Image (spheres, rainbow, N blue to C red):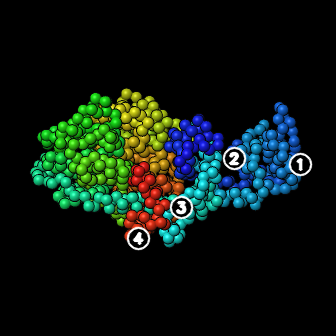
Amino acid sequence: MESSVTELKGIGAKTEKLLNRIGVYTIKDILLYFPRDYIRYKAPVPPGEVTAEGVYAVTARVAGMPLLKRAGGMELVQAKAADETGALECVWFRAPYVRSLLKAGQAYIFYGKVKQKGRGFCMEQPEIFTPAKYMEKQKTLQPVYARTEGLSNSALVKAIRQALDKIPLVYEFLPEPIRIKEGICEYNFALRQIHFPDSIENLAIARRRLVYDEFFIFILNVQRQKEKRTKIANNFPILNETVIPYILSHLPYQLTVAQKKSLDEVICDLKKDTAMQRLIQGDVGSGKTVVAFLCMALMGENGYQSALMAPTEVLARQHYETFVKMCVDFKLERKVVLLTGSLTARERRRAYEDMQIYPDAMVIGTQALIQEKAVFSNLALVVTDEQHRFGVRQRETLADKGRFPHILVMSATPIPRTLAIIIYGDMDISVIDETPAKRLPNKNCVVGTSYRRTAFEFIRKEVKKGHQAYVICPLVEKSEELEAENVTDYTARLEEYYGQDVRVCCLNGKMKPLEKNRIMEEFAGGNIDVLVSTTVVEVGVNVPNATVMMIENAERFGLAQLHQLRGRVGRGDAQSYCIMVDHANSKGSKQRLEILNHSNDGFFIAGEDLKLRGPGDFFGIRQSGDLAFTLADVYQDADVLKRAAEDVAWLLEEDPELIKEENRGLSAVVCRQEGEGMSL
Ligand code: ADP
Ligand code: MG
């Protein structure tokens, strides 16, 4: 499993490089590279229905004897597939044996690519099936993998088939009693069927097993982590807390009741005998940042350091600016340090120094905070923003940088409380379930592409009023595979459309961090009017002056994601708008988008989306894709999640240390995962 993919036949240096690009290095990696979708063999049609080039399954009889011909030094077999609707020519190159496979007058299914030939059509190199055999085939599903340029689906299929045949049976790590109780299939079966399902039923069975595994291992890790942490003493006594009322009286607004309640819960935790482990869950725009600021300021007042980790460079910088500004506004003399990957060597050295010199600094950054060289001198509180983007491990690594600091995590993913308790099983939970009162709710609309001009003119008007807009496209650049808007072409189009009137700029995830920062800062500073962006702005970005969010190919995004995107506007006092452009214009997409159109409540939206999807509909857009499970979806697989949680509880009751013989395999998997870093 751990050997390189190059051990597989047909994978040389070139293919290896391409595979590396999609994160595949070992045989195990390629086996765990699950299909993105599946297709079926097509329903057969009579020859008369072949009216354009494309892939067909044609059902017909062979008219007369197949002919063996010679053209340009090459042997080819030619046959006519015909019925009363018409005839289709079929050819096979360099395959004289085909003649003996075909019997004149017999019915077959010919499956292959049809090309135009003169005024008629010709199917090249078709596969030949008996009708019965083809019916069998039609039950199976062909995997479609996410690819990178230069890597074909068939190359992946070949490699994975080989890997499946080559590897010895994988050890079954799930304890037998659990497997039997849950009625779930064996791992080997699941692995084979997820790639090459014999039927849709088997695919569902396979998927259920793999989803169960993901949840089970995840919860087991969380529970074991919890065991480790519950007995940790609070090393950081709070002696002063004047800074809280002081800041509150200087804030330009009043905290909402929910913000106040969460803040009180945190402060109460900080005064306990044991270290805090708390999650603040609050919808987009509910005002989590200021709560984090207050907690960190309190640590500062008591002479301790605190750290805030954000998932993106853009967000970390924005938090930094906000914190610095608040310190200035409130005349708080506190060092705020920024530590991200894009700092120059000199800036970074400076940040490291500051972390040593100031025992009460507030340190803000990205994952750069958990790098080895980042050493805190007095870390007492660790805050992670947009927790779902990080792994449990990363949170712990940052925590390891102090002497058992308090942990506060913030998330906007709207998970129902019952599920949150399982997923964040090692934490207490606070909920901010209201948004600041003065704010006007967003106005939403779902439109077709013909509405675009109107939208552009609407944006122009908003810009004239001094506001700004986002336009979101799914792709960075033109793609051969996906029919969807891309930011590169869209920016050019808008630049041409607006001319000098409106300043348009492009932002995407492929840009260098420094470039992204610069653009985000320009946008925040009001030097860009319209930001054409991929979903990199989805997480946490706060530009209150932006009032329009226009989303192209809205049908391609999950509702939760759309809700997050929409949360980028409506953050100031002005009325804000969200324009969702639906390219599919199908009944399904309309129905889904209507949910967003009518509600601004994240919890409600997630619940409704689930209701719309049937239980077998597991290849739709994943709602909680950002929760970093590979296959599992917290909403859709909620029942599996609950069962896995019960089973973990049972297991840990029976064998807390996982030392019993039947739990050995599991123990090995858990230990390995702990090493690799489980992600949440
Ligand atoms: P999120 O919870 O999505 O992280 P933020 O913390 O970024 O939200 O807050 C969004 C905006 O709301 C910010 O501009 C912030 O200053 C403002 N804000 C936060 N709390 C309040 C409040 N109680 N009243 C008015 N505005 C607030
Ligand atoms: Mg936020």
How many angstroms separate mark 2 from mark 4 (CA)?
56 Å
* Left or right of residue 55, residue 293 in this image: left
Under mark 2, the amino acid is Val
- The percent position of residue 338, horizontal first and vertical second, equals 26, 38
Q: Are marks 1 and 4 in contact (CB under 8 Å)?
A: no
Residue at image mark 1: 65
What is the spatial separation of the Cα atoms under label 3 and label 2, in whole angstroms? Answer: 40 Å
| Dot 3 amino acid type | Glu
Asked if marks 4 and 3 touch (Cβ < 8 Å), the reply is: no
Inter-mark Cα distance, 4 to 3 = 19 Å
- Residue 520: x, y in percent? 33, 36
N-term-proximal mark, 3 vs 1: 1
Count of residue discs: 4
Return the residue nearer the eye: 278 or 502.
278
Which one is closest to the eye, mark 1 or mark 4?
Answer: 4
Q: Which amino acid is tagged 4?
A: Glu
Give the residue at mark 2. 55
